[in-house]
Amino acid sequence: MSDEKPVKATAKKSAPAKSAPEAPKGDRLQKILAAAGIASRRKAEEIILEGRVQVNGTTITDLGTRHDATKDHIRVDGKLLKGPEQQRYYMLNKPRGYVTTLNDPQKRPTVMQLMIQQKSGPHGDNVRLYPVGRLDYLSEGLLLMTNDGDLANALSKAATGVEKTYLVKVSGVPAPSGLDQIRRGIMIDRGRLDEVRSGRRDRIITAPAKLELVRGGDNPWYELTLTEGRNRQLRKMFEEIGHHVEKIRRIGYGALRLDVPPGEFRELTLGEVMALDRASKGKKVVPKKTLPEFAQLKAPVKKKPSGPGRRTFASKTKPTRRAS
């Protein structure tokens, strides 16, 4: 008979569960540089890869690192970052003959030249502004300018459905059936007008649009509201129904309506910025019912009367001097 004592079974202790790794804190370095006005995010990435950025004394060449701009000492080319720029928001009335870009290789006038006062920006604080979306060289009207990259990107996404309203002058009178095509959605070329991909034209159907006649005549004006902004979209839509677009003026963006003279700008109010933020999130915004002066068509110039009923004046001649 064995005198061994029975051994009590003990439950195995389970290993402590591993806690999930903490998500990295702070913002990506390229975003911090862009917010400080150093350069665009894409250009900031190049600056980092070139080894021109130091964080707390260490040179950073990895684009994935995150940092806290309020705590870390960040230097670019040896100069200490002063923190993010104050965010600015402007409405500019772009005239015809200006390009919506920061620099133009063809040396044409740019919208940035309209925003500069004494080479120090509209507030004298050298903020780096850039346009939200585009208006082509021959188009005019409401253009948003800001240094808030997050809001600019959100507003530019077609999925948000931000409404943009235009006055469009057309050569010739379109047929009602053609206008209905535009209202329902019309097939146009994607990309540039002369672009061909894989040996064929790349076509896409536009989203439904609001369209109504503003002024009739041989070359009528229409008010047209879109929720997207493809390359030269308005011109392509009317060309598909056989009509050339002579003039385009953007008069509305979300709840904003154009209220500054051509070539001039003003800073947006806090309420207007909040309305843009709501629109960027797909929420409904309502513009003012009364259109400002610069969002309206000017009254047509009346032709001066001619013929028998018009008074004419003989040209003045110097009197001849009598001989004494």
Image (spheres, rainbow, N blue to C red):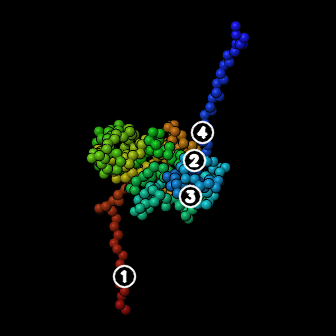
Q: Is residue 103 visible?
A: yes
Q: How busy is the neighbourhood of tag 2: few (under 14 within 10 Å), some, or many (20 plus)?
A: some
Q: How busy is the neighbourhood of tag 4: few (under 14 within 10 Å), some, or many (20 plus)?
A: few
Of pointers 3 and 1, the one earlier in the residue sequence: 3
Which residue corresponds to the image point at 31% horizontal and 44% vertical from the top-left? 202
Which residue corresponds to the image point at 35% horizontal and 78% vertical from the top-left? 317
Give the CA separation, mark 3 to mark 1.
Answer: 82 Å
Q: Give the SS element for disc 2.
A: loop
Give the CA separation, mark 2 to mark 4.
Answer: 12 Å
User: In the depicted view, which residue is nearer to us: 202 or 297?
Assistant: 202
Kind of residue at badge 3: Arg
Numbered mark located on residue 65 in the image = 2
Give the CA separation, mark 4 to mark 1.
Answer: 96 Å
Of pointers 1 and 2, the one earlier in the residue sequence: 2
Q: Which residue is mark 3?
A: 52
Disc 3 + disc 1, Cβ < 8 Å: no
Give the CA separation, mark 3 to mark 2.
Answer: 15 Å
Q: Which residue is mark 4?
A: 23
Q: Give the SS element for disc 4.
A: loop
Image check: 262 left or right of 168?
right
In percent of width and height, residue 4 lies at 71, 13
Kind of residue at badge 1: Pro
